[in-house]
Image (cartoon, coloured by chain):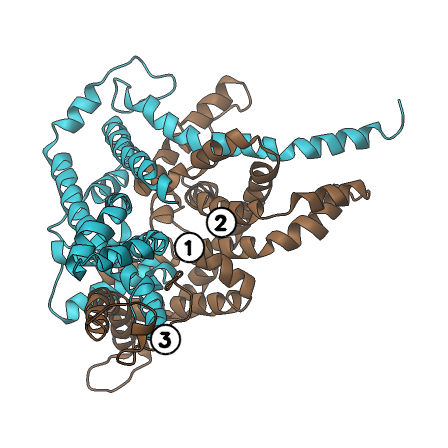
Chain colours: A brown, B cyan
Amino acid sequence: MTGAGPDEPREEPTALADGGTVARPGLGDVGPLRDWAAAALPLALAVFLGVLPLVVLLYESVAAPGRLVSLEAYRRALDPLNLRIMARSFAVATVVTVVCLAVAYPVTYWLANRCRRRLRLPLLLVLVTPLWLNYVVLEYTWVWVLAREGVLNALAGALGLIGAPLELYPTRLSLLAGFVYLYLPYVVLTMYVSMERLDYRMVEAARDLGASDWRVFRDVVGPQTVAGAAAGALIVYARIAGGFLTPAVLGPVTDQMLAQVIVRAYRTNLDYGFAAALAFVFLAVVALLLAVGARSPQVREELKRW
Amino acid sequence: MSPTTPRRLLVRAGRRLPVAVLAVTLVFLYVPVVSIAYFSVAPTAQPSVPIEGVSLRWYAAVLSDERFLRGLRSSFLVGGVVALLGTALGTLGAYTLVRSRLPRWLRGLVGLVIALPLFVPTVVVALGIGLFAGRVDLGFGYPTVVLGHLAWVLPFSTFLLTARYAELDDRLVEAARDLGASDREVTRTVTLPLLAPALVASALFCFTLSFNEFLITFMLAGGEVTTMPLQIFSKVRRGATSFLNAASVLILLVSAVLAVTASLLRRPTT
C-alpha cells in the first residue's frame, strides 16, 4: 500500500525518491512541482488572511507618527477600566464554560452509554442542530423568551408563580442564557466523542464492587473523559470571552465586554492603535491558555478531532 | 419502612438525573425557536401571549420588503462565491495535506496556518483583516467581505475534504495509471467523481457558515454591503417586532434546509 494515511511518514521528495513508493513512469520529477503549485494557493490565502493580519495588528498597535515604536496604545488598553472589562469577559467565559460542562457531562454520559442505540444519533443531531442555525436570529429569539411581555413571564404569570413580570432582559441572566445557548452544542459534541470511548464495563465493575455514584464519577468516568472536557472548554472559552453579538443583543448596557470595546474603537472611533493593542493583549491571553491546555497530549488528541 | 429509604430515593433520583438534564436541555434549546415561530403569526406588530389571532401578514410584509430582499440577495451572493472558492481552495489544501509529496514539516505548517482562524478569536481575525485591507487600500465592500469569510471557512472545507481524501483507495488511481490514464484523466475520471459527495457537502457547509456569519461581515462590510444577519442586527437594536419575527423564521428555515441537505450528503462519507 502506498501512503495510506495523512500521518504516515513520507520520504523527502529528493528528485526520484518517491518513484520507489509510487510507480509513475516518467512523472517522477513533475509530481512535486505540481504539488507545490497545489499547495501555493491555499497557503497563500491562509498566510494572506491569517498570518499577515496578525503582523499588521502588531504593527498598528505600536505605530506612532514620528517614532519607531510607541507603547501608548498599550498603556491605554491596559488602563483600569479596560482591565475590568477584560476581567469581566473572562469571568463570563468561565461561568458559561462551567455551566456548559455541567450540562454536557450527564447528557453525553447518558446518551453515549445508557440511551437506546436507536435513539442515540437522532438525539445527538437534535442537540447539535443549533450549530447550523443563524446565530444572530438565535440570540434574538431569546428576547422574546425573556422580555417583560415574553413567554417566560406570561407562563409564570398564568401559573400564578409571580405577581409582576420579572425584569429578565437585558440582564446578566439573559447574557448567560444567550452564551450557553450558542456554545452548549460545541461542548456536547466534543464530550460525546470522549464519552463514546468510555469503557462502560469499568463503570459496571466499580458498581459491582460497591462504589457510590460519586466514586464512580471520580475514579472511573472523570479520569477517562477529562481530556474531552478540557478540549471542549478550550474550544468555547476564547470564543465566549471574545463574543460580540451576545452581549450586544442580550447583555445589560452597563456590562460591556471586550469585543464590544474593540469593535467600537475600530468602527466608531477609528482608534486603530487602541483596537489593535487591546486585540493583541486578548490574543496573548488566549494563546497562553491554549499553550497550557495543549501541553497535555490527550487534550491535543481531542483538539485534533476538530 | 427502613431508615435508609430517603437515601435510596435520593440514589434513584440520582440515576434519573441525566435524563432530566437532557429533557431540560432540549426544552432550553427549542423553546426560543418555537416561541419566535408562535409570535411570527401574530396579527399585531407588538404581540404578547396569547397572540390575538393567526395571520401571515408579516410574512407577506417581509417578502415584499425591498431592503430584506436586498439583504437576502447579498447573503446568497457572498455565500455562493465563498462556497465555490472555499471548496476549490479546500480541495487543494486537502490534496496538500494528504496526497502531496512535499516535505512533512511543510505539510504540517500548511495545516497549521490553515487552522489558525479556528484558534484565534473571530474579533481578532476580523480586526486584523480589516486593518490589513485598510493598509493595502483594499477598503471595505464585497471583495473584503468575501476574503474575510474565506479565512473563516477554509479550515472547515479543508479538514472535511481531508477526511474524505484520506479514505480514497490509492489502488484505483494506480489502476487508472496502469491503464494509461494521464494525471488529468485520473483527476477527471477517478478522483473527482469519488470526491463529488464531499465536494457538494463542503460547498453547502461553506455556504451555511458564510450565510450565518455576522461579526466578520460587520467589521468588513463598510456602508455598501448589507447581508441578512446585518439587517437583523440593526433592527434588533431598534426593538423586537413581528416583522423581525417573520424574517427570523424564514432565515431559520433557510439554514435548517441547508443543514439537513449537507448532513444527508455527508453521512456516507463519515
Q: Could you tell me residue A55's position as x and y percent?
A: 27, 74
Left or right: where B244 falls relative to B9: left
Within 10 Å of the Cα at label 2, are there few (<14), some (14-19), or many (20+) other Cα atoms?
many
Residue A306 numbered tag = 1
Q: Could you tell me residue A84's position as x and y percent?
A: 45, 62
Q: Do discs 2 and 1 share a chain?
A: yes
Amino acid type at image mark 1 = Trp
Going from the N terminus, do you reach mark 1 or mark 3 first? 3
In the rendered image, which quarter is residue B8 located in? top right
Residue B269 in view here: yes
Amino acid type at image mark 3 = Glu
Mark 3 lies on residue: A11
SS for dot 3 = loop
Image quadrant in which the C terminus of chain B is located: top left
Left or right: where B51 falls relative to A31: right
Q: Measure the alpha-carbon separation of dots 2 and 1.
A: 9 Å
Going from the N terminus, do you reach mark 2 or mark 1 first? 2
Left or right: where A7 falls relative to A136: right
Going from the N terminus, do you reach mark 2 or mark 3 first? 3
Mark 2 lies on residue: A190
Q: Measure the alpha-carbon separation of dots 2 and 3.
A: 34 Å
Left or right: where B176 falls relative to B115: left
